[in-house]
Amino acid sequence: MKDLYLIYKNLTRKKLRLFLTCFAIFIAFLIFGAITALQGALNAGVEMSADNRLITANKINFTQPLPFAYVNKVKNIEGVKDVSYANWFGGFYQEPANQVVTMAVDPTTYFTVYDELVVPEAQLKQWQNNQRGVIVGERMAKTFNWKVGDTIPMSSNIFTNKDGTQTWQLQVDGIFTAKDEKTDTGYIVFHHKYFMETQTWGGDNVGWLMLTTTDSALNQQVSDAIDTNFANSAAETETSTEAAFNKAFIEQIGNIGLIIFGVVFMAFFTILVVVGNTMVLAIRERTNEIAVLKTLGFSSPRIFKMILIESCLLAFIGGLLGLGAAFVIVQGASEAMARFLPNLVLDQGIVLQALGYMLLLGLITGIVPAIRALRLNIVTGFQGA
Amino acid sequence: MSEDVLFDLVNVSKKFVKGKEQISIFDGLNMQINKGDFVAIMGPSGSGKTTLLNMLGGVDQPSSGEVSFDNQRIDNLSEGKLAKWRANNIGFIFQFYNLMPMLNAFRNVELPLLLTNMSSKERAQRVQNALKLVGLDDRAKHMPSEMSGGQQQRVAIARAVVSDPKLLLCDEPTGDLDRKTADEILETLQLLNKEFGKTIVMVTHDPSAAKYAKHTLHLDKGEFVLEAK
Amino acid sequence: MSLVSQSSAVIMMNVRSLPRRFWMSAAMVFASAVVVAILLAFLAMAKGFETTMQSAGSDDVAFFLRVSSAAELNSTVSNEQVNILTNAPGIASNENGPIISPELYVIVDGVKKSSQTKANIPLRGINQQGIALRENFKLTQGRMYSTGTNELIVGQGILDEFAGFELGDEIRSGKNVWTVVGVFTTGGNVFESELWADAKVIQSLYNRGSSYQSVRAKLTSPDQIEPIKAFVENDPRLNQDVQSEKSYFSEQSKGLSYMALFGRVISTIMALGALAGALNTMYTSVSDRAGEIATLRAIGFSHISAFIGTLTEALVLSVIGGILGSIAAFIFFDGLSAATLGGSFTQVVFQFQLTSDLFLQGATMALVIGFISGLFPAWRAARLPVVIAFQNGR
């Protein structure tokens, strides 16, 4: 491409302006990358939900328990494949600030229902046979440096152990990983039965049920059947798909999330508008030179192409640097905030989206001056000089 | 039509619409320029000198009439074809040099060659030759802003001749230069005409510049006023 | 000619030539406006949340939670423990005895008007003394619930943000049906995001036996908190932590303080991007006026006046932007009602608040952008060689 040198020289003719423009684009895509990753992390629960997984919770609110007997009753409903259950433990490690998402679950069914989680066979067996055992998520294991064989004191900010303390000594039997990077592994699970036997309130209940259907087409039918079954009982239920359940949970954050992301995206587009304006004006200053090129015999389409390539190049230089910086930041934050935002990743989707915006920025800012150049009458081009 | 005729203008008219008024610059202009000629076109401002030059260079088209170059009509060519035609046949020299400010002398001269299929090695050779011709082969790496007006105009001449066009069109080439530098530039043009057989059409309002040409045409209100040299 | 009149002449010239650079100048105004608006939006959000939480806590109310519970939802207090606490020192009394309020905190679902989605709402079980303890409590509609019935009163915030809590509405929560008989305010604080009902009724409907979750006690004076702490620590039957209600809520209000931090970080990064744009504008302005500046210098204007002229142009543009941004933020965000998940896992309804100190921060931001984006181009303007004035246009 013989014109590349010309394009390069046009691009770099004013170093300061090039730097400032690139920097602004850099900032825009830095913000875009980081914020979109953050948004993705918040929505990951919805995105990673299995199609055929349902959650049954107390109709009053999911913090209210359900009778243990519901487990077997749900199992007998047509279309239900596997049923598991869990209780919220409210865990923390050593001090209240170190919150650890901890659930008491059914060891025989939990990893069947959540089949995207991977536990080595031997570890799973060992755990199922050890009622004080705990299986920890990969991310939690990393955060607190737990290894198989460790005994970890897990405290609850809700429950009291029968020994009078609020702490349970649990033995790490295994570490679970996930097939997909975005699946949350930032929590730990231990035996539901052991939990029920050792906490002071006693009772025979479960926090909520997780179940899979034989076919996701049956989801609606199954959830209706479950809810009808328990209608007018002491604990009415509400069954929804895992995706809907997670979405509802995120939406509790409310319009705040909407406002924040709205505001930040506005910021992103503002920078693009400001930068685009500069780019358009920068090329407009060259009307006379474009007239000269045309006089020399450069065809209009060729000049059109040169200008578009130049503006796209500018958009991609700034944009890719910004996206790169966002990647580094997200990577760093992902480790620092593993416990709060387990799914912070700048994934392929975001990169593609950003590349799309870069191309758009390059095209839009280039198209106005490029069309002007295409239409430029040489005679008036010189007169305007 | 004679083989010697490079340009043939037949019954050319050019009209502008300015506001509600229609301004006629040429009305039924006839003109021939022979190959190897060096023609100076003189006349007061507004006489249509530059419009004529623009039509010759194919950057402006007549309202009616025919313009032929080397027995080929150019007044009805499309914009794209005209661009190609210009690249192959015409070298332009402007009053304000019109060099690309971000390119050095070498790269400026190379520009027209980017429109050909030459290899970069071939291009470099040609550019060096052209710069040598105008006596600036030691300034190849200099930027326009680092050169005097005369030097810049010589770079512009090198750019005009580098692709070896048949015709050079000069629009007030010395209008921005002092007498001594102007004479040097005009001598270079004369050399190109005599030694290299380039046909040159030069618009000027400077009588002493016109002296370098073989013929001088006086243009007044869109018509040639005959005046023997 | 004095520096002042010189400078003002230059400033006038710059301002008059602004239309020539309209789009560039507009871009700078726009950039400055958006940066200020975004900063204000985040600050107003954090401020609104903070005010809602902090105004709820008073420092003459002692607040008892079970050790390490952190929030009311997780805590328990037995009836026996409540009785012990009633005898603690320093608790104020009224005609109904010591002002001590054992309370229950149950989460129920409500449907948000804005999104039609379900969200957690706290249903507080309370008694007469609990209401007496909240001094800014006022019924604005209807009447008080009758003890021992399925009646409740709703906070103004709930009424505003959630559907189906109008006076007279029936609310189904599991098998239980509640009737809304009144609406209350507590001066805009977090209690307005709650439903209140008789504690005894909640105990029976939600299988809580005779236990409660938290205890509040009105103190005769704020410094009575220390004796109470000692009292609790010395009684082995008590496993409660005591703090002033105020300190509890200021801890809870930290929930959204990351929002302010986030907003500051984002708008600072944004401001950097906007600065780059603004610097471009000002450099263009200087090169656009290079001939004029040099001509003025040739006539005898000092280079300081060229400097001041350019700096002022930048400040004027960014301040115009700042004002527009503030107005936009005020129109769009001030008083904007929002609800989000608070520290107790329940919805807190609050209003964005744009106070004068926030506007001051926005103005500072605009001035900083204007100053920096003007300084360097002004420096260049001041050093433009006078000779440019004598050169040809090109």
Image: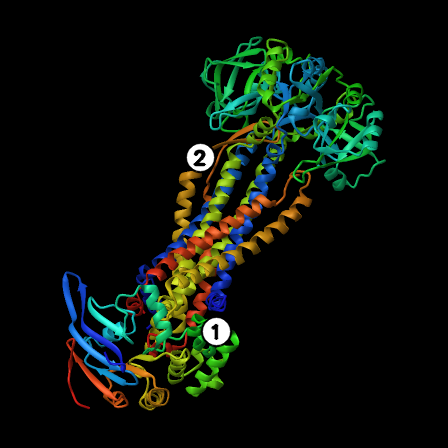
Expressed as whole percent of the image width and height from the top left, the position of residue B174 reads 31, 84
Asked which quadrant contains residue C245, the reply is top right
Expressed as whole percent of the image width and height from the top left, the position of residue C316 reads 38, 57
Q: Is residue C233 left or right of residue A222?
A: right
On residue C335, the disc is 2
Helix, strand, or loop for circle 2? loop
Helix, strand, or loop for circle 1? loop
Expressed as whole percent of the image width and height from the top left, the position of residue A114 reads 70, 29
The amino acid on which the numbered mark 1 sits, given as a three-letter code, is Met
Tell me if I can see residue C101 in this picture.
Answer: no
Decide: few, some or many residues near mark 1? Use Cα within 10 Å; few <14, some 14-19, many ≥20.
few
Please state which of residues B26 and A205 is positioned toward the viewer in this rendering: B26
Specify the subunit that label 1 lies on: B
Expressed as whole percent of the image width and height from the top left, the position of residue C207 reads 66, 12
As drawn, A379 above or below B153: above
Please state which of residues C83 and A295 is positioned toward the viewer in this rendering: A295
As drawn, C158 above or below C316: above
Please state which of residues C60 and C365 is positioned toward the viewer in this rendering: C365
* Residue occupying image coordinates x 83% and y 36%: A148
On residue B118, the disc is 1
* Residue occupying image coordinates x 57% and y 56%: A321
The amino acid on which the numbered mark 2 sits, given as a three-letter code, is Gly
